[in-house]
Amino acid sequence: VPTKQPLVEPTMPPVFNPTPFPVAAPVPTPTSVPTKQPLVGPTMPPVFNPTPFPVAAPVPVPTSVPTKQPLVGPTMPPVFNPTLFPVAAPVPAPTSACAPITFVGTSKGFSDGNDASLTGPLGGFDDSWMSRGFNVVSFAATTNYLLSQQTFDTYDSEAESDAMFSFLLTVPSGSLVVVLAMDAIDHWSGNKHIGNNLKSYISTSFGASQFSSLTFRESYGFIGYKGDSTPLAEETKTSGSGFVSVTATSSCS
């Protein structure tokens, strides 16, 4: 009986390497389990900046609540001035009541001095503008301040009579009105340039009684209130018989 041979571990057959290169060394089996590393929170990815300019620094978060400021009343907005010029100062209100004023008007036809003048208005009065025809001036009843003035050459045409009629229509009721004739107030030929509408209106709205009969170069003066039935003063003189002077005091109604 053959003797039993001891068991021998089988040996691995040699590795076949069909290529001329050396066989890679086997990866060694780890001898221990690696220690777990502590978890770390994810980090923010880098900021993407598509432009070549640097990223703006983030706005810091306030560390404390700001203290409330006390309420302040609204301020007035600035004055709007659409022009390049400074804003005009407001006109001050009158500081005193209207004082009575005495008006003196003079009328001189062509043959009696050929002139017209007026004195008495506040601050003086420039009557150098007065000329041929009817010179009309209006004043405010409550202040005696000048409202309007104009000359109407009714010697030249009846259109001037219509213009005077329209002028008197615009004068406020209660205003003081002065009418002074100079040179000639109607045409010498007998053509009546003083229209009937003007004659009627002065008679009914101002109380004039002598206006409707005026002719050519007569002197004529009138002072009265619009709306009164009787004038303060009215006078007429025919050509060559002297000039007219009318006087009246305005009491500030």
Image (cartoon, rainbow, N blue to C red):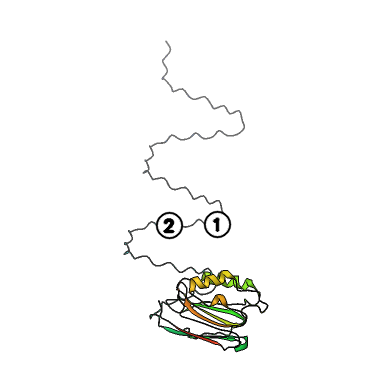
Q: Which residue is at a point 55% across and 57% down the rendered structure image?
A: 53
**Badge 1: residue crowd in 10 Å (few <14, some 14–19, many ≥20):** few
* Residue 158 at least partly seen: yes
Query: Which badge, 1 or 2, is on the more N-terminal residue?
Result: 1
Q: Is residue 63 left or right of residue 203?
A: left
Which corner quadrant holds the N terminus? top left
Estimate the x, y position of residue 140 in percent, counting from the top left.
46, 76
* Residue 130 at least partly seen: no
The answer for how far apart the CA atoms under marks 1 and 2 are is 18 Å
Q: Quadrant of residue 240?
A: bottom right
Q: Which residue is at a point 44% across and 48% down the rendered structure image?
A: 44
Q: Which residue is at a point 50% across and 69% down the rendered structure image?
A: 81
**Mark 2 — residue?**
59
**Mark 1 — residue?**
53
Which corner quadrant holds the C terminus? bottom left
Estimate the x, y position of residue 99 in percent, counting from the top left.
40, 83
User: In the image, what residue type sits under mark 2?
Assistant: Val
Q: Nearer the viewer, mark 1 or mark 2?
A: 2
Helix, strand or loop at disc 2? loop
Helix, strand or loop at disc 1? loop
Estimate the x, y position of residue 11 in percent, counting from the top left.
48, 24
Closest to the observer: 191 or 165? 191
User: In the image, what residue type sits under mark 1?
Assistant: Phe
